[in-house]
Image (cartoon, rainbow, N blue to C red):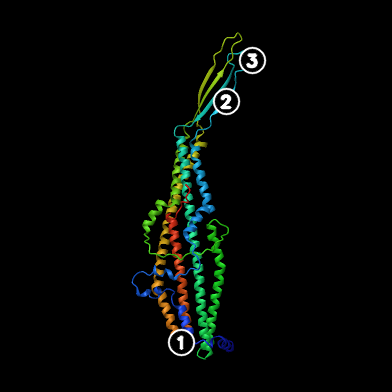
Amino acid sequence: MAAPFQKCTSNIFSIIPKRYVAVWLLGLLLPLDPQQASAGNHTHSPISQQESTLETIGPVTPLADLIAEALENNPEIQAALREREAARQRISPAEALDDPMLEAGVINAPLTSSPFNREDMTMKMIGLSQRFPFPGKRGLRKAVASKDAESTEYAWQETVNRVVRDLKVAYADLWLTLETTRLIEKNKLTLEGLLHLAEQHYAVGIGSQADALKAQTQVSRMQNELLKLARERPVIEAELIRTLGQSTYAATLNPAPPSIQSTALNLESLRETALAQRPQLLALQSLAARNQKALELARKDYYPDFDVRLSYGQRDSMLDGSRRPDMVTMTVAINLPLWRADKIEPRIAESLAMHHQALDLYQAQSNEIAANLRQQVATAEQNFKSIQLYRTTILPQARLTVESALAAYQVGQVDFLTLLDSQLAVFDYEINLVTTMANHVKALAQIDLLTGSAPYSSGRE
């Protein structure tokens, strides 16, 4: 097994001094931003300073532009918008009177003779009738429809907020995938440099073949991770495109690095905000109010409605030419709500049950939102602290450890495995950092949804 490595060394690295390889490796291991290397020497928060260490390739796709596009094109939002408009159109008909009835005919015509002038009671009649609900019913019907429309309005806002949350999460996932790919490629390049260094040491007899094999294994592992990410990226892009309301997307999606800033997250204040403006809760409140009005309307069925009828009867003159006066008729009819046990009382019981159901759902959703807020706030706060710790302490120390191990390995003070483990630790910390950043952003997106803070205006009212 020694021959291949010796041959490789003689062909490639025999003309490259080891000190040049070490300097090249040191350049790979140093942070990209000088501020990051000296972060441990500053007393103020390094979060904003180190945003520049996150690279982006090509033009950035702003999140705000994608949100605006989703508000215009997402079919779920458009469907909810249509439902809102339909509910608004049901308010006016709910209060309107029934259509009046027009009737015409002949009254009291004798069967024995057809002329209209033989009998005094024979007349040609035209009439108009109108049903008037018992006072208060029309107003309650309008109130029920208005609360339905209000609930649908909040449902539309909730749909918009949910789509925006999904978009933010997919945006963060895509950034994490691209950033992880970049870190793996950088680490793979560093490991290849360590592999070359191990082969050089092995070629001159101061290293072991196992060192080179270990480095080669890690290089292969990085290649496998790149293949996995290449499979995952289209799935994440498809989810992002779906939230935009598209089946395909011509432009290249290149998310911007997340801006990690210290944000005060007061759990009690967030809970009060959620109770005041979360569309899902407001919709349940409207539903409970709607069912209360429906209960009042059902109880109004104990009272009759009124049918008012006005008719005009025209009579022909008598056989001797004497004129018969025309007739006017006015009647008022009412329905008799006698079947209460079979018709009215079940409706009242139904409305009462639906009212209590809405109240129970509101309480259940309030409890769930409070629990989810507690979880997401804890996640966001812990992630922010972890980001600070990685950037100010863990990563600077880990990079110094690699630099020290590399220098010590050059003079034979540490073995190759120590150097390799130090570099892999830096890689793991970098991956943990970007993963924590993405999780922090996603937790904030969840908090926005839970509190109803996401934008819901699409410019069409």
Residue 228 visible somewhere in the drawing: yes
Q: Position of residue 357 (x, y in %)?
A: 46, 47
Judge whether 201 appears above or below 152 on screen.
below
Quadrant into which the N terminus falls: bottom right
Q: Position of residue 11 (x, y in %)?
A: 57, 87
Q: Position of residue 185 (x, y in %)?
A: 52, 74
Q: Which residue is mark 1?
A: 410
Amino acid type at circle 2 is Glu
Q: Which mark is residue 8?
A: none
Mark nearer the viewer, 1 or 3 = 1
Amino acid type at circle 1 is Gln
Quadrant of res 391:
bottom left
Q: Which residue is mark 3?
A: 115
Judge whether 328 appears above or below 252 on screen.
above
- Please tell me whether mark 1 sits on a helix, a strand or a loop: helix
Q: Residues within 10 Å of mark 2 (few under 14, many from 20)?
A: few
Judge whether 261 appears above or below 342 on screen.
below
Quadrant of res 433:
bottom left
**Sequence-first tag of 3 and 2:** 2
**Sequence-first tag of 2 and 1:** 2
**Sequence-first tag of 1 and 3:** 3
Amino acid type at circle 3 is Pro
Comparing 4 with 306, the one in front is: 4
Q: Which residue is mark 2?
A: 103
- Please tell me whether mark 2 sits on a helix, a strand or a loop: strand
Q: Which residue appears at 40% of the width and 61% of the height?
A: 377
Mark nearer the viewer, 2 or 1 = 1
Comparing 242 with 345, the one in front is: 242
